[in-house]
Image: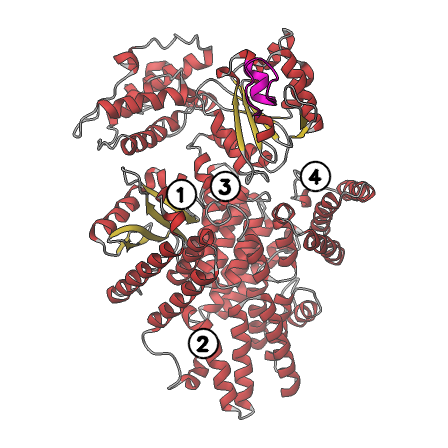
């Protein structure tokens, strides 16, 4: 059940029937975990098929069961489902609290969610709770990943929500481009959900620009188009729509198709969504149809609902209406109190109404607003240091500074205590170790190093990026840098004066000194601290190859289950990294990861290594030995080349997988060995089964899920990317300064077919670093000869591979030019369109062109 797709809106009634049957089986067997997960899926199905009452009751029961169990495994497995349950009720603070503690959400949201729709409601909840910049950074990250993976429909949905969040912030100019592009794409593909969201948001932008008639006309046109298409708008931004309906009603405009102000207010006021109910009650009071007492009663209930929801902006709008009502009643003191409370939320978004500014005279905060906010930030960090565990402090500090700086992405960079003083990403928000290694991050690394060398905060502004780096000095030298950046919003750091930046830098240094003093044992070795929160960096796999990205997406989907996985691929492709990634993304991530490489264990010792032995079990068994299977209990056992296991060992392994117990050689009792098995091989195990060398039943048992790692020669876009990573790593490892790869170096690397794959590339780069001088990089090739002199047919390639290599060779000769005299098409004797089609079939990327 844990792998069931939860995009249940695509499926018919048979899904509901099957889920109910599965729930009955789970209940009959006393399996409360499966019962809980199934109920969440069933509730999701009902919600997506317009049965909200059924959905809420079922998910409520499931949520109560989760709270009873309360262990980390069930909380993690059901996090997205519980967050959706809270979202349906408008409990946006609970959505954020549930999801932000899920592994991977903060730094790599494009990889961590099982349901691709989760970022949509998570981003919306982040915005409603005032964390706009975090929402923008997360939505931009998942949108980019979706576009990269060819998921255009999903990318458009992320884009329209990104536009809505920008508009909620009052960033109409930035929002307009996203909304119009999403609307056009949605109209072309008849994606009516995205289309209605985009058009409602664009109409709302016109309303906020005081273009009420244009807004009404725009929304009317959208509704007519939906009527013609026979579509009822769903999942639209209610907060925008309600404000527009009130404005149109006050102007005396005719009601729109599908929507009537009074009907919407009645529907939402009676519903279970406290967020929408709070807004509807406020608009009910603003209509002016009730006396002052009834209006205030509605506003007080609206205030209570929005407090529960966690939406500070909508709560402030309710308080504005309460202040106006108190002014009408002559209670200026109460009106001023409410106006001040509203001003704190609305002033930064330019939403505070002019008619109440008179209440702020002589009472509003001074001109140095951000100095006051800095004081609040320092108080928050002080509380974090005093009350939280050392392992949580750095991430919480980054969250706090991210909200202060209003950044979309953030990272805390640290220098290790190793001799090479490597700079590493300690923890990130919408920023991963993989992002830092990307070519596009090089200028930002330069900025980070500049802040370190000058020991002064640095700001960077370009058309596509705003960045801020604040170095933190401890023990007389800069050891840490706070990095914050915005991709969507510009001039975001202009509010910071040099004086304020200096104050922030000094205070951050003071805080960091206290953190070090608080936990000296953990800080004794900088690398221990730096990697404590970032285990996932160890299994980062560098790739831009579409096939690799698809395999990684499958791997991440499989990782959350407990099924066996067989990883296949040539020697040197990095199958071990895939195995580590499975472990770090599994529910067993806190357990051990044990490796058994059968290729390096003598055959006579394989049983002892795997199963362990008691003292005296055989002549050489002088001491008791715990086997790798026993060591892997509650974790993952990775067996490399299982095809080399002797037949008796294969039989025992199959039995242990079934019983989850192992007996040491010479032992008299079995011991628990509850591990998840991951295997990897460069052999064709199916052929080994046919030849009688490998048990067929064991083959089927370990091959429930299969991941195939493509060879490096089929990942042309990755060769230079990985080479640069190895170059940086080797330079730090050997404490050498070397220049970067030249264009000619890159061409040389791309011209080789890499029979030894990534492992061979790593060896070549390490040899190169050792033998190079500071001013010149000598690309030392295997055996001291040029890679390009190797025969391209030594590995006996197939016809497709021969064509692929020759087309690449011609493209390099022509400098990437395809058409025209002397172009690749002319040399190959092919029409340009035929060559393009052939290149696409062979996986020769656009960049290769």
Of 278 and 176, the residue lying toward us: 278
Q: Mark 4 points at which residue?
A: 1
Rendering coords of residue 697 (x, y %): 69, 17
Up the image or down, 175 lies above or below 16; here it is below
Q: What stretch is highlighted in magenta?
A: 605-627
Quadrant where the N terminus sits is top right
The C terminus: image quadrant? top left
Residue 607, x across and y down, in percent: 59, 17
Which quadrant of the view contains residue 793? top left
Q: Name the residue under label 1.
A: 528
| Residue 626 is a magenta residue | yes
Q: Mark 2 or mark 4: which comes first in sequence?
A: 4
Give the foreground label among 1 and 4. Answer: 1
Q: Is residue 200 left or right of residue 812?
A: right
Structural crowding at the residue carrying mark 2, measured as other residues with C-alpha within 10 Å and reported as few (<14), some (14–19) or many (≥20): many
Q: How many callouts does the rendering have? A: 4
């Amino acid at each position: 059940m844990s792998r069931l797709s939860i995009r249940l809106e695509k499926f018919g009634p048979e899904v509901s029937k099957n889920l109910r049957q599965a729930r009955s089986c789970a209940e009959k067997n006393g399996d409360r975990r499966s019962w809980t997960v199934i109920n969440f899926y069933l509730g999701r199905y009902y919600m997506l098929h317009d049965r909200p009452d059924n959905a809420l009751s079922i998910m409520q029961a499931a949520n109560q069961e989760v709270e009873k169990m309360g262990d980390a495994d069930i909380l993690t497995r059901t996090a997205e489902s519980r967050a959706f349950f809270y979202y349906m009720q408008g409990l946006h603070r609970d959505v954020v609290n549930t999801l932000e503690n899920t592994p991977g959400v903060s730094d790599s949201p494009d990889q961590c969610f099982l349901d691709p729709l989760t970022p949509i409601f998570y981003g919306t909840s982040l915005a409603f709770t005032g964390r706009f910049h975090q929402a923008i950074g997360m939505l931009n990250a998942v949108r980019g990943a979706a576009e990269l993976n060819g998921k255009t429909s999903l990318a458009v949905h992320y884009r329209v929500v990104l536009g809505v969040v920008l508009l909620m912030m009052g960033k109409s100019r930035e929002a307009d481009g996203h909304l119009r592009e999403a609307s056009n794409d949605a109209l072309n593909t008849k994606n009516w959900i995205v289309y209605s969201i985009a058009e409602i948001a664009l109409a709302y932008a016109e309303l906020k620009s005081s273009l009420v008639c244009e807004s009404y006309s725009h929304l009317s046109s959208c509704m007519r188009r939906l009527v013609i298409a026979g579509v009822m708008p769903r999942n639209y931004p209610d907060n925008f729509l309600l404000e527009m309906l009130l404005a149109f009603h006050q102007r005396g405009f005719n009601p729109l198709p599908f929507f009537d102000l009074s009907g919407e207010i009645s529907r939402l006021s009676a519903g279970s969504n406290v967020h929408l109910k709070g807004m509807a009650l406020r608009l009910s009071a603003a209509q002016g149809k009730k006396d002052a007492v009834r209006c205030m009663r509605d506003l007080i209930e609206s205030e209570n609902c929005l407090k529960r929801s966690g939406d500070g902006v909508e709560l402030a709008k309710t308080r504005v209406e309460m202040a106006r009502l108190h002014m009408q009643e002559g209670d200026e003191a109460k009106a001023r109190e409410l106006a001040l409370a509203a001003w704190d939320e609305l002033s930064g978004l330019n939403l505070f109404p002019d008619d109440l500014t008179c209440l702020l005279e002589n009472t509003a905060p001074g001109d140095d607003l951000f100095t006051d906010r800095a004081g609040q930030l320092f108080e928050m960090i002080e509380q974090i240091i005093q009350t939280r565990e050392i392992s949580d402090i750095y991430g919480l500090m980054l969250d706090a500074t991210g909200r202060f700086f209003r950044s979309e992405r953030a990272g805390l960079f640290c220098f290790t205590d190793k001799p090479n003083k490597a700079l590493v990403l300690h923890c990130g928000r919408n920023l991963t170790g993989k992002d830092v290694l990307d070519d596009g991050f090089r200028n930002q690394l330069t900025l980070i190093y500049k802040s370190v060398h000058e020991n002064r905060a640095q700001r960077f502004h370009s058309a596509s990026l705003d960045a801020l780096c604040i170095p933190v000095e401890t023990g007389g030298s800069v050891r840490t840098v706070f990095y914050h950046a915005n991709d969507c919003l510009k001039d975001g750091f202009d509010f910071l004066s040099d004086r304020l930046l200096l104050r922030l830098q000094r205070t951050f240094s003071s805080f960091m000194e206290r953190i070090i003093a608080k936990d000296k044992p953990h800080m004794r070795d900088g690398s221990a601290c730096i990697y404590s929160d970032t285990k996932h960096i160890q299994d980062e796999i560098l790739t831009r190859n579409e096939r690799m990205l698809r395999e990684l997406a499958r791997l991440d989907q499989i990782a959350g289950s407990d099924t066996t996985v067989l990883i296949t691929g040539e020697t040197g492709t990095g199958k071990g990294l895939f195995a580590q990634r499975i472990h770090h993304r599994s529910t067993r991530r806190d357990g051990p990861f044990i490796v058994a490489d059968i290729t390096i264990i003598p055959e006579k010792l394989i049983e002892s290594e795997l199963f362990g032995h008691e003292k005296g079990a055989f002549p050489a068994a002088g001491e008791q030995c715990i086997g790798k299977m026993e060591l892997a209990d509650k974790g993952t056992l990775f067996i490399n080349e299982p095809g080399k296991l002797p037949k008796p060992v294969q039989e025992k392994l199959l039995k242990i997988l079934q019983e989850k117990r192992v007996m040491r050689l010479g032992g008299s009792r079995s011991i628990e060995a509850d591990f998840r098995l991951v295997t990897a091989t460069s052999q064709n195990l199916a052929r080994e089964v046919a030849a009688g060398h490998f048990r067929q039943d064991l083959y089927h048992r370990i091959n429930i899920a299969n991941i195939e790692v493509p060879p490096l020669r089929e990942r042309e876009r990755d060769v230079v990317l990985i080479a640069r990573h190895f170059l940086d790593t080797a330079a730090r490892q050997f404490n050498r300064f070397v220049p970067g790869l030249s264009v000619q170096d890159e061409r040389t690397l791309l011209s080789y077919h890499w029979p030894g794959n990534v492992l061979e590339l790593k060896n070549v780069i390490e040899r190169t670093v050792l033998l190079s001088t500071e001013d010149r990089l000598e690309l030392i090739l295997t055996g001291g000869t040029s890679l390009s002199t190797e025969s391209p047919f030594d590995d006996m390639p197939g016809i497709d591979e021969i064509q692929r290599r020759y087309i690449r060779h011609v493209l390099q000769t022509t400098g990437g030019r395809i058409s025209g005299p002397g172009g690749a098409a002319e040399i190959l004797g092919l029409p340009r369109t035929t060559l393009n089609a052939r290149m696409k079939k062979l996986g020769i990327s656009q960049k290769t062109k």
